[in-house]
Amino acid sequence: MIRDITIGQYYPSGSIIHRLDPRVKLIGTFLFILSLFLFDSLYGYIAVTIFLFTAIKLSKVPVLYILRGLKAVIVLLLFTTFFNLFFKTGNRIIFEYGIIKISDKGVYDSVFTIIRLTYLIIGSSLMTFTTTPNQLTDGLEKVLHPLNHIKVPVHEIAMMMSIALRFIPILLEETDKIMKAQMARGADFESGGLIKKAKSLIPLLVPLFVSAFRRANDLAMAMEARCYRGGEGRTKMKPLRYHSRDVVSYVIILTYLATTIVIGIFDRNPFI
């Protein structure tokens, strides 16, 4: 499962999505996530599916590589499905056994909640696959720049988020190395019950935390040695500038958002 976590990783490619301004991708991802909650009907999910998989096709990131990241959140998806399936009441009971009741609305909500969460994760992952950490930092700083007027440390916030995303694949790689080293010494992470598996993680977590703190300390010393003093007065080697493709992307994203709003207004969930 460690190898299946893909969030925070960058997939290099020369696609049109990779060449977009990071501000377009950040705002587009936010609007895409927002659009998932603007409707509750089949036509809305069809529109989202077309938009999302068109973006994946244009990004040239393999679909199987993106879907591999869903394995890490399968427990969350199953947990959400369970609650929607057994605790949502509807007009028609499909299955009943004792206190267990499954209604038509429960099935409907379970299916589309899974789709909604899956698309949310895929859309967010696609942004990190097509945006380098440096671009992400610059884009976040530009998008949040108006908050500087109310004394919000925008540069520091963007820097922390970028470092956190960059450290995810590094820590996953470190975890994989520690697991292999422990298994070579006879550690067993697979067999046994839940309590035994939890106890077997202790030899893994201790060196992982030590490694994480060591890396954080090395990074802090490196930044201090290079006279890093925050964002005030700093210049950019590659300042962000909008191009025609970015303007076209904004138009497409806003058209998509308007479509989902219209669908949400006129096409209601039949189980409400």
Image (tube, rainbow, N blue to C red):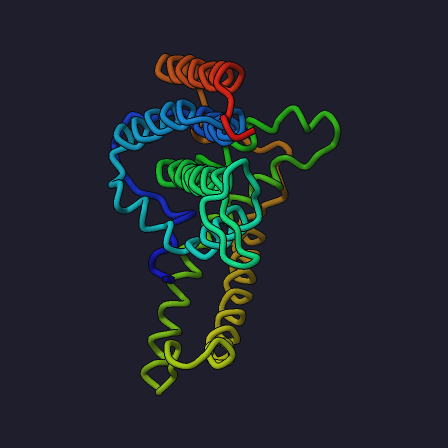
Left or right relative to 168: residue 65: left
* Camera-side residue of 30 and 50: 50
- Rendered position, 205 above or below 87: below
- Rendered position, 77 above or below 109: below
Residue drawn at x 56%, y 32% as measured from the top left: 141
Q: Residue furthest bottom?
A: 186
**Residue 65 appearing in the image:** yes
Position in image of residue 118 (x %, y %): 41, 42
Picture quarter with the N terminus: bottom left
Picture quarter with the C terminus: top right
Q: How many marks?
A: 0
Position in image of residue 20 (x %, y %): 37, 25
- Rendered position, 107 above or below 78: above
User: Toward which corner of the image does residue 22 lie, by quadrant?
Assistant: top left
* Camera-side residue of 8 and 53: 53
* Camera-side residue of 38 and 206: 38
Position in image of residue 235 (x %, y %): 53, 30
Position in image of residue 129 (x %, y %): 36, 40
Residue drawn at x 38%, y 47% as measured from the top left: 9
Left or right relative to 21: residue 195: right
**Residue 132 appearing in the image:** no
Residue drawn at x 36%, y 50% as measured from the top left: 69
Residue drawn at x 49%, y 52% as measured from the top left: 96
